[in-house]
Amino acid sequence: MQEFAAIALLLAAGPEPAHAKHVSGVASLAPRQARVIAKFCFDYNPACKDGSPCSDPPGRLDFEVFGAKQTGGGFVSKEDPRVYVALLDDEYFSFPEVSQVWSEANCSDVTKSAKRSFELHWADISKADPGASVTSKVIEKVRPRWWYVAIASCSDQALEMNYRLYLENSLQGSQKQLSMDEMSIVSIASMFLLLFAGLAAAQIDSWRKWQEFRNGAPAGHSLLLASVVLAAIGQLFWLSFFQRYKETGETTPSFAIIGRASAVAAKTIMQIMLVLLAQGESVCTPGISWVRHKEMVAAMVFYGFLSFALESWGDREASGSRIEYIYDTRARTALVAMELMWLYVYTSRCWDTFQNETRARPRRFYKHYASALSLWFAALPLVAALAAVLAPWVRYRIVFLVSNFAHVLTMSALVYILHPRIAPDLLDLNAKDHEVSNNSEELAGFLGSALEDEDSW
């Protein structure tokens, strides 16, 4: 895993950035409607005073519109359409208020709520690139603040246009491309890549040591190894995503997709393993009877796919709305509810297994470790509650830090439990093979055996 560490250091020490955050696309506007195309948390400068020029404005916005055309299904208005760029912020009487009726709001509602608006002349924006451009300084004096950039059509005709948008926090040096809630995200992602890579190296070393035993590694060891490696791969892609964003101001969606998919897969595999442990597999029996748990595994895999889909959808829903963090979306609320369900499943199964088990080693596992591992299922609800009370301009990076820290802690506990020096004191390893027979009578006979030879391993 030294390669992961080297990559993390190289990415964290990448070239000095030289660009603002870059957002581009095509905006399609219904008659007299507006569309939010970007939001960004700008810095503040208390030295900027009312009524006097600000020598060091904390933010800057550059906007370009070109290639505009009417798309009215054959009917083209003879009058030039009126189009505005509206800049709204997170003060209640600006974006939060108008966003509550956004689908019914017309052009004038949006421009009246805007802190600043610029009319775009049709003769300019209908030209090919470069078209029309707008530059605006963003001055905040009290605190960092979210700003929303919208294109508003005051025309009775449907319109379509291309746009480019550049946003920067001018006082943040090499991190000026980042929104204020994303500051230091590259350093945080680098730290977690090193931690996950270290856990992967430790788990591989543990697997090698288990090969010195007659029966090899216990059941569940390979599951944990796959989970740790996927977590490291996911963190590598997230670091690459954030580093490119920091350097160029542009995001790479494919990196985010791979990073999210790998992280969700790692968490899903780990949760499958935790529920299996709760039901006594690898703890009270020397192997895993997959046939008995196929419904649970299928449900957990479905939950993993659903988590990936809901997280991706939640990101898109939050990107163009007054929502400041995706835990405020319906998608993430559904995820929190499902995670609470898995917490109940895990704790109830652990309690039932502990009550029915009479042997010392399995009871020791449930008494000393099962309750601590249950905190993983409580992590997402706790993180969501934390997000609700954090200031919007620090929320993203703190939640990213806390959620990844919970992931690292849980994996560290599992790596420790399955280490060759620890596992024999907690798990039932007394079998010639670590595969449980699918024959229920043979399995029942094995579990009912009175023989408990703790020295046979």
Image (cartoon, rainbow, N blue to C red):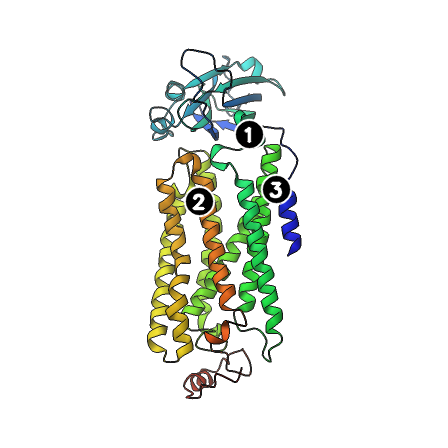
Q: Position of residue 52 (x, y in %)?
A: 44, 11
- Neighbor class of circle 1 (other Cα within 10 Å; few <14, some 14-19, many 20+) is many
Q: Earlier in the sequence, mark 2 or mark 1?
A: 1
Q: Residue at x 37, y 50 (%)?
A: 382
For the residue labelled by badge 3, is the local secondary structure a helix, a strand or a loop?
Answer: helix
Q: Quadrant of residue 154?
A: top left
Q: Which residue is mark 2?
A: 399
Q: Which mark is residue 12?
A: 3
Q: Horizontal and vertical percent for residue 440? A: 45, 82
Q: Is residue 82 visible?
A: no
Quadrant in the rendering for residue 96: top left
Q: Relative to residue 457, is residue 26 depicted above or below?
A: above
What is the crowding at mark 2: few (fewer than 14 residues within 10 Å), some, or many (at least 20)? some
Gap in angstroms between the C-alphas marked 2 and 1: 21 Å
Q: Amino acid at mark 2?
A: Val
Q: Position of residue 289 (x, y in %)?
A: 48, 75
Mark 3 in CB contact with mark 1 (< 8 angstroms): no
Judging from the image, what secondary structure is the residue with disc 1 in?
loop
- Say which amino acid is labelled 1: Lys
Report the disc number at residue 442: none
Q: Secondary structure at mark 2?
A: helix
**Of residues 296 and 371, the one drawn nearer to the viewer in this rendering:** 371
Question: Is 34 situated above or below 407?
Answer: above
Distance in Å between CA atoms under marks 3 and 1: 16 Å
Q: Which residue is mark 1?
A: 176
